[in-house]
Image (cartoon, helix red, strand yellow):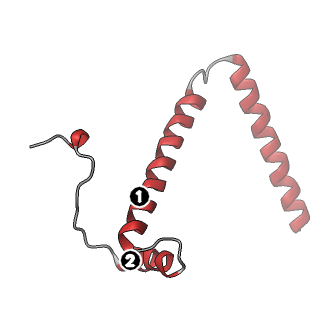
Amino acid sequence: MESPDNVSSKQVGVRLPGHLYRWLKEKVDSGEYSNMAQSVIGELTKARTLEEVRRRETSLYGAGENEPLVRMVNERIEGFRRELLDEVKRRQA
């Protein structure tokens, strides 16, 4: 049997939960994809790309967490975040 790395494409039959089927069907109906197979492939490809980007970002941001400059920048960002949240709360009150 071939390893998955050597297979360029493989047909898979699955049952989708109703909410996923309706979501993908809407994408086909709106013209975003030409058919259901393309919508499944397209959305899985997007999900995989996002996962890979997140994994890369995590490794970049996690590296050097104990370095003084990184710690200082993270503390400053957190300070800005708190200030913005306080300002939003003040404006809502």
40 left or right of 5?
right
Q: Quadrant of the N terminus?
A: top left
Residue for badge 2: 21
Q: Position of residue 37 (x, y in %)?
A: 35, 69
Q: Quadrant of the C terminus?
A: bottom right
Which of the pair 48/62 is nearer the observer? 48
Residue for badge 1: 44
For the point 48% across and 71% down, the residue is: 33
Q: Secondary structure at mark 1?
A: helix
Which of the pair 30/62 is nearer the observer? 30
Q: Secondary structure at mark 2?
A: helix
3D distance between C-alphas at marks 1 and 2: 13 Å
Which of the pair 14/65 is nearer the observer? 14
> Height in image: 84 above or below 35?
above
Q: Residue furthest left?
A: 1
For the point 79% across and 33% down, the residue is: 76
Which amino acid, by three-letter code, is at mark 2? Tyr
Q: Position of residue 50 (x, y in %)?
A: 51, 49
Q: Position of residue 22 (x, y in %)?
A: 43, 80
State if disc 2 and disc 1 touch (CB < 8 Å).
no
Displayed quadrant of residue 69: top right
Which of the pair 8/24 is nearer the observer? 8
For the point 50% across and 75% down, the residue is: 27
60 left or right of 43?
right
Which amino acid, by three-letter code, is at mark 1? Leu
